[in-house]
Image: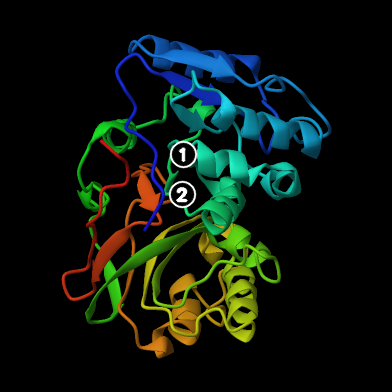
Amino acid sequence: MALKGQSLPPGGTIGVPAPAWCYQQRSDILRGVEWWEARGYKVKLAEGIYERQGYVAGSPEQRGRDLTAMFADDEVDFVQCSGAGFGSAHTIPHIDFDVIRANPKPFMGYSDITALHAAIGHHTGLVTFHGPIFDEVNQHYVTELTSDSMMRALTHPGPLGRVPNIPEDPYVRAFNGGKVTARLVGGCLWLLGQTIGTPWQIDLRGNILFFEEVAAPPWYIDGLLTQMEQAGMFEGVAGIVIGEMTNCDWSVNSSHNWPGHLSTEDVFEMHLEPLGVPMIYGLPLGHGKHLWTLPLGVTATLDADERSLTIDEPALEA
């Protein structure tokens, strides 16, 4: 049975570690603080939130300690990562997973934070959330769908239900038909590939794989899927949900859009469609305009005939 944190209470405290990239503008952090405080919540920034060591937020040891400390802190109700980009995997050897297991809380982030979703899920079984990072919540480009789904995910006591389609482009492609109910795992494709050979290599057997990516041309995606395939990761996968592949086609990644180049969909047809499992592509789960907060580690139903993904299990304890 999945380990779950408690719902975010009114007036609760958001704990903010920076396990990956360092902040770019100090105002990005201040914006996040003001957004949460304007809604009646408190914010507790990690000790190393303003550290910089090259492109990451301090040493791996510091970042690992900060993340562990947020789970250990009785005042913190919800852990939302600041920054993403690169560096989360550095921290994994320096995280005390026993502390996380003993103090389950909602944990949120996306993109590079996938490394932590994978490691925390492996070591503790905690349900985590693929959702907005702290320094994005108060940015001008964040949509109501993004912020509303985040708050609902943190406060709704029941299953989150069906993932909506992208409002501006509701088309969702099905590669194979069928329907399956299973545990949902995944995140950003590049980071999922980085788990190969680690103790926390993502386990797809009997599970629904979700992935998304940004600014990765088709040949790069081809390489990642080839490595995952050759590592045996797709053996026994129950279904596949592909979110948005933002800026991943040749038209945005190359000055030459030659007909001979494969598209991202061509790559999926080559590597994933032959698996024969239910598979859909195009939900607002990724680096696009909208980011619907998706719980990882819960039971979900993928219905490729209806082109839908529905979260069946509550992600939090009431």
190 horizontally vs 309: left or right: right
Q: In this view, does 65 lie above or below 26?
A: below
- Under circle 2, the secondary element is loop
User: Is disc 1 placed on a helix, strand or loop?
Assistant: loop
| Residue at x-position 50% and y-position 31% | 79
The tag on residue 29 is none
* Spot occupied by residue 99 in the image (x, y as percentages of width and height): 59, 38
Q: Position of residue 56 (x, y in %)?
A: 75, 35
Viewer-closest of 184 and 29: 184
Give yes or no for contact between labels 2 and 1 (Cβ–Cβ under 8 Å): yes
Amino acid type, residue under disc 1 in the picture: Pro
What residue did someone put label 2 on? 126
Residue at screen point 56% across, 50% down: 120
Q: Is residue 290 visible?
A: yes
Label 2: how many Cα within 10 Å (few below 14, some 14–19, many 20+): many
Mark 2 or 1 closer to N-term?
1
Q: Which amino acid does label 2 sit on?
A: Leu
**Res. 254 visible in picture:** no
Instruction: Write the residue at 44% across / 21% down.
Output: 138
Give the residue number, with chain letter if any, for mark 1: 104
| Spatial CA span between label 2 and label 1 | 7 Å
Percent position of residue 73, x then y: 56, 23
